[in-house]
Amino acid sequence: MFAKIQIYTMKGFKLTFSILFFVTVAFTACKDDDNNDAVEDPRAQNLKALGTSAEDILSNATFKSLTVELAYTNNQKPSQEALDRFKDFIIARVNKSDGVNFIETVVPNQSGAPFTIQEIRDIETNIRTQYTVGDDIAMYVFFSNGSSENDTDTTVTLGTAYQNTSVVVYQNTLVNITADDPEVLPLLESTTLHHEFGHILGLVNIQDDDIHIDGEHEDLDHPKHCVIEDCLMFFEASNITRSHVTRMVNMLRQRANVPEFDIELCLADLQAKGSR
């Protein structure tokens, strides 16, 4: 396994936004479609439902390499510590004989915050440069310079995995949360990144294909999250109350490391799909 890192810049995008909230699934030709007469959307394989590409990302069966695009603005670049940790995290989990390629794309500040999830999708359409082609499957992470429109006085969204290969991390929110203790920021960035990547990989029971019996793995009080409090996929690492954020920041400060997948539950699920 090897990793390659590239950095690109993008300038001059003007975005228009529409309001729509839900996952869009593209019903277009798939990778193995032999209908050469069909006109395929080059983005089609990256517009599927959350969790549907878990095995493709983890295993070496169909796609031999993985490209990960990390898009951020100049004033909201995540810490190098978090980026390096995320790269190690992915390489440790995926089986790719041709390796993992990391591309960093610097983009202009995106206007219109706070963002709806549809606006986040529109931003992706404008700035994403890497899509699944041939035997290389691509995923995309946008470190947003604005917050989520879903935030309230009592709840806050740290990140969202919203399609099969798409993640947004609300970087501006993470910076604000850790303003009084910036040393915790890399840990919070990493926890958010790794947690949302876990959702991309189908955790927990995103596609109703968990290998464990009902209630053993998925937290029925907080669907699509793990019952184990110390696990990376515990519900407190995503859309949570502001009091939970304070608790999580304190926990990260005390333990000085990022939560990991529970071995018997989350990691077992990933290994069943081809993970290392």
Image (cartoon, grey):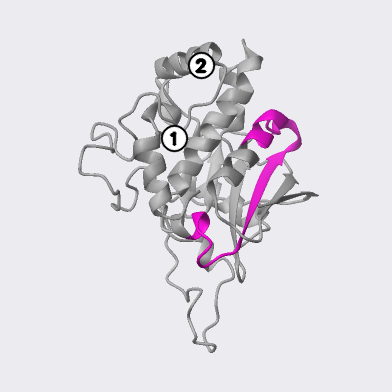
Q: Which residue is mark 2?
A: 249
Q: Which residue is mark 1?
A: 261
Image quadrant where residue 85 sits: top right
Of residues 228 and 26, the one nearer the viewer is 228
Confirm or deny contact between disc 2 and disc 1 (CB under 8 A). no
Looking at the image, residue 86 sits to the left or right of residue 53; the answer is right
Q: Is residue 172 above or below residue 269?
A: above
Residue at the spot 61% in from the left edge and 28% down from the top edge: 172
The amino acid beneath tag 1 is: Phe
Q: Is residue 59 above or below residue 180?
A: below
Residue 140 visible in the current orientation = yes
Q: Is residue 253 above or below residue 185?
A: above
Of residues 140 and 76, the one nearer the viewer is 140
Instruction: Give the farthest residue toward the bottom.
Output: 37
Measuring from the top left, give residue 33's x and y in whole percent: 48, 81
Residue 160 visible in the current orientation = no
Looking at the image, residue 11 sits to the left or right of residue 173; the answer is right
Measuring from the top left, give residue 14's x and y in whole percent: 70, 51
Measuring from the top left, give residue 208's x and y in whole percent: 28, 52
